[in-house]
Image: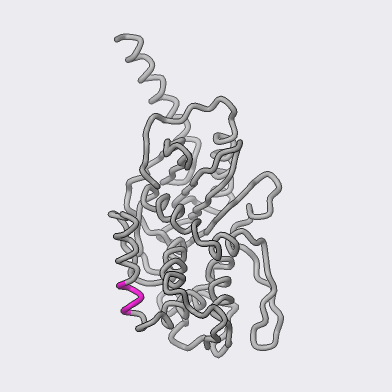
Amino acid sequence: MIRSLLLAVAITAASSASAATVGSKHAIVIDEGTGHVVFEKNATDIVPIASLTKLMTAMVVLDTKPDMHERITVAEEDVDTLKFSSSRVPVGAVLSRHELLELALMSSDNRAAHALARTYPGGMEHFKLAVRSKAHMLNLRRTNIEEPTGLSPYNTSTATDLAKLALAASKYPEIEKITTVSNDVIDVNGSMRQYHNTNKLVGDKNWSILMSKTGYTQEAGRCIIMRVRAAGRDAIMVLLNARGSASRTADANYLHRLLTKEHHQPVMARLNIK
């Protein structure tokens, strides 16, 4: 009895020390194969999720099996009037649906994401209904998404819910491929422009990233979702509300080292993400 109590105290102390090492306010790492929670910090708190929203936007659009070669004109209504964020996609640009998806996911362009939702079959209202239906299907009980870009602070979720979202998104080959490319050159109205992945860890030889998405707003802080392969196992990593990009990267690297420790014993908790 005493030995069990001491062991429980030791595990709690180790968990607290690890949580203190991670600067992101909310985080979770899950061994995909076993469902064991390797690391957790405030993972059930409901918080803004910024551009992590775009993974849901991409899934809902792809679920309709649209013509990815269809040309779409970026319209004035795709311009951000909430936070007046910048974009390298000018109004009037004509791009394929696939190119808009690439811009929305890889370089996190808000106009591209909005254009995808605006041209959803039935328009924006049908898009929002599809998002709610998808969230329900994925059992995202503490997730609320009101628009397609993540600019709204009312797009909220938890690290736990986002782990489920990440796993679902990783099953889409288009999302997997787009989010793991370091950069690409896209023809925008006859001008070849290079766009870069907002996740600087993509392409890092020390990482094997299978899917990723970053996010940032003032309310959400620096956020990231990744599906990674480390030490022969696949894992879902979610970090929310880091102070800055460097802090977010430091947290990710720390958790990556945690995953690759050969004799690491996961916290004895299980999350059903299948």
Whole-percent x, y for residue 133 in the image: 30, 66
Q: Which of the 4 image quadrants contains residue 245?
A: bottom right
Front-most of residues 76 and 273: 273
Whole-percent x, y for residue 26 in the image: 41, 46
Quarter of the image with the N terminus in it: top left
Whole-percent x, y for residue 201 in the image: 63, 52
Whole-percent x, y for residue 166 in the image: 46, 54
45 over 133 or under it: above or below: above
267 over 89 or under it: above or below: above
Hey, which residue is sitting farthest bottom in the picture?
92
Residue 128 magenta: yes
Q: Which of the 4 image quadrants contains residue 199?
A: bottom right
Front-most of residues 173 and 91: 173
Front-most of residues 191 and 47: 191
Main SS of the magenta segment? helix
Residue 55 magenta: no
149 over 48 or under it: above or below: below
Question: Residue at (54%, 56%) from the top-left corner?
Answer: 212
Magenta region: 125-129
Hey, which residue is sitting farthest top in the picture?
2
Front-most of residues 125 and 150: 125
Question: Residue at (45%, 41%) from the top-left corner?
Answer: 30
What colouring does the structure picture have? one colour
Position of residue 72 in the picture relative to residue 128 (left or right): right
Question: Residue at (51%, 80%) from the top-left corner?
Answer: 67
Q: How many marks?
A: 0
